[in-house]
Amino acid sequence: MKRVIAYLAYRPEFVLRACRAKRPDDWKLYVDSDHAGDQKITPRSHSGIIFFLNGMPVHWKSKKQPMTALSSAAAEIYAFSEAVKDMNLLLWRAEDIGVKVEWPAKIFEDNKATVSFQHSTQPSTKLRGIYNLRWNWVLELRDTSRVVAVKISTDLNIADMMTKCYKPGELDRMLRLCKMVH
């Protein structure tokens, strides 16, 4: 995140613009994880979350995971669980102030393991012994009446910029994808 802020300090043309959405109260929720992406510094993964309301970022987070994940699938599911907690709080607050929220909320994720984890009754072999399917937080992740994991292409996952360091050209591409720069 420090690199993004330093990058933006040299970009005076960068501004956030609020635009009217084609349909009111349009939520876009993204999550990503890098499995041990900073190997030289730490084996722990990063979780990245960014939520948009009508095209404007309203919540974002980049945070190192508390434990070393045994697989990329485990890192992604941990990131997804963090996104679901943040999503619940944000969307409940939005409902409290009269913003329309459609349930189940969709969270865009670029890892098929999360989608498979949410919908299957048999966890992937990569996850065997890591999560107990009876744990309450796991049951909440699998509750498709509240949240649905939606697989998208990695190059369309905006939360990717919360987990990785980009060269300026690639960061520009991500910011254009967010409609934050022209």
Image (tube, rainbow, N blue to C red):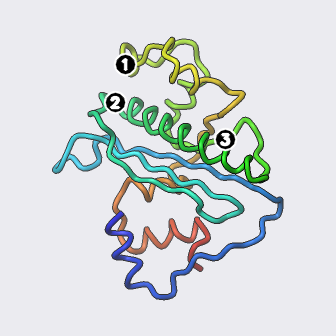
Q: Quick one: label 3 or label 2, which is nearer the N terminus? A: 2
Give above or below for 83 relative to 94: above
Where is mark 1, residue-wise?
Answer: 130
State the separation of the CA atoms marked 1 and 3. 25 Å
Q: Quick one: label 1 or label 3, which is nearer the N terminus? A: 3
Where is mark 3, residue-wise?
Answer: 106
Residue 134 percent coordinates (x, y): 51, 11
- The three-letter amino acid code for the residue at tag 1 is Ile
Q: Is residue 46 left or right of residue 112?
A: left
Furthest-left residue in this view: 40
Quadrant where the N terminus is found in the figure = bottom left
Q: Quick one: label 1 or label 2, which is nearer the N terminus? A: 2
State the separation of the CA atoms marked 1 and 2. 10 Å
Q: Evaluate if marks 1 and 2 touch, with contact meaning CB atoms under 8 Å apart.
A: yes
For label 2, the crowd category at 10 Å Cα-Cα, with few meaning under 14, some 14 to 19 and many 20 or more, is some
Where is mark 2, residue-wise?
Answer: 71
For label 3, the crowd category at 10 Å Cα-Cα, with few meaning under 14, some 14 to 19 and many 20 or more, is many
At x 37% / y 19%, what residue is drawn? 130
Callout 1: helix, strand or loop? loop
- The three-letter amino acid code for the residue at tag 2 is Ser
In depth, the one of 176 and 46 nearer the eye is 46
Furthest-bottom residue in this view: 12
Residue 141 percent coordinates (x, y): 56, 27
Quadrant where the C terminus is found in the figure = bottom right
- Residue 44 found in image quarter: top left
Residue 162 percent coordinates (x, y): 42, 56
Mark 3 against mark 2, which lies toward the viewer? 3
Q: Evaluate if marks 3 and 2 touch, with contact meaning CB atoms under 8 Å apart.
A: no
Mark 1 against mark 2, which lies toward the viewer? 1
